[in-house]
């Protein structure tokens, strides 16, 4: 942003490497700047999640994800399925660009990405100018928080900003599919 003093508080938190809590299509998510290793490590520590599992990036549009995806490796015959499914609560596991940091991909050579239709997340990604890390707001292996009040009780000051806006109305977290094979990992 050209003038950080005019940026919304949530964007300033992201720019400063803080973790935010925000609504997604079905659950509250924890997010941060995917390019800030310390922010991602902070998020993983809050969740008690090992870096090896990798993370999801959520974006306003596919163009925001091109830095992280090896687009040239996606076969033409798979593109229709992927791009016709967005924007929606469908996450695709795609080949990662060689430059994509391991703090995002974990033990994999792939990256999980989603183009959302949730208005709050779209706005955040537009204002921030790039995707957000998106992982469910819970301790690893436990249920996600169901309200902002519950989130504040569980995470307190570990989260720099709570985006108190409605969830998207989906009853299940995003479907996760392999872009190369179509295999469904979740959903």
Image (tube, rainbow, N blue to C red):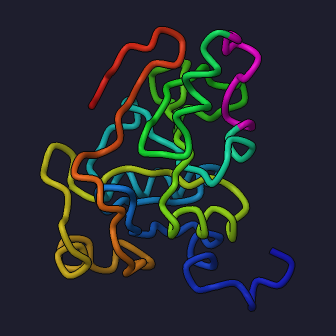
Residues in magenta, as a range: 66-76
Which of the image's four quarters has the C terminus?
A: top left
Q: How many discs appear?
A: 0
Which of the image's four quarters has the N terminus?
A: bottom right
Residue at x 40% of width, y 37% of height: 51
Question: 138 and 88: which one is in front?
Answer: 88
Q: Is residue 3 above or below residue 91?
A: below
Q: Is residue 67 magenta?
A: yes
Q: Position of residue 151 (x, y in %)?
A: 23, 73
Residue at x 21% of width, y 46% of height: 140
Q: Quadrant of residue 141?
A: top left
Left or right, residue 83 beside residue 137: right
Q: Position of residue 163 (x, y in %)?
A: 42, 78
Q: Position of residue 144 (x, y in %)?
A: 19, 57
Left or right, residue 48 beside residue 166: left
Q: Is residue 32 above or below residue 116?
A: below
Residue at x 13% of width, y 49% of height: 142
């Amino acid at each position: 942003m050209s003038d950080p003093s005019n940026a919304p508080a949530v964007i300033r938190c992201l720019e400063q490497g803080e973790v935010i809590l925000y609504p997604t299509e079905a659950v509250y998510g924890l997010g941060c700047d995917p390019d800030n290793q310390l922010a991602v490590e902070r998020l993983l520590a809050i969740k008690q999640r090992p870096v090896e599992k990798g993370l999801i990036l959520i974006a306003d549009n596919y163009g925001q994800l091109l830095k992280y995806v090896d687009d040239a490796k996606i076969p033409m015959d798979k593109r229709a399925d992927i791009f016709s499914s967005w924007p929606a609560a469908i996450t695709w596991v795609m080949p990662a660009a060689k430059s994509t940091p391991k703090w995002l991909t974990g033990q994999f050579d792939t990256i999980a990405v989603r183009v959302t239709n949730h208005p709050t997340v779209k706005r955040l990604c537009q204002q921030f100018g790039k995707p957000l890390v998106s992982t469910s707001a819970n301790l690893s292996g436990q249920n996600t928080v169901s309200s902002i009040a519950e989130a504040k009780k569980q995470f307190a000051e570990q989260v720099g900003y709570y985006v108190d806006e409605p969830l998207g109305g989906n009853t299940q977290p995003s479907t996760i599919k392999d872009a190369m094979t179509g295999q469904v990992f979740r959903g």
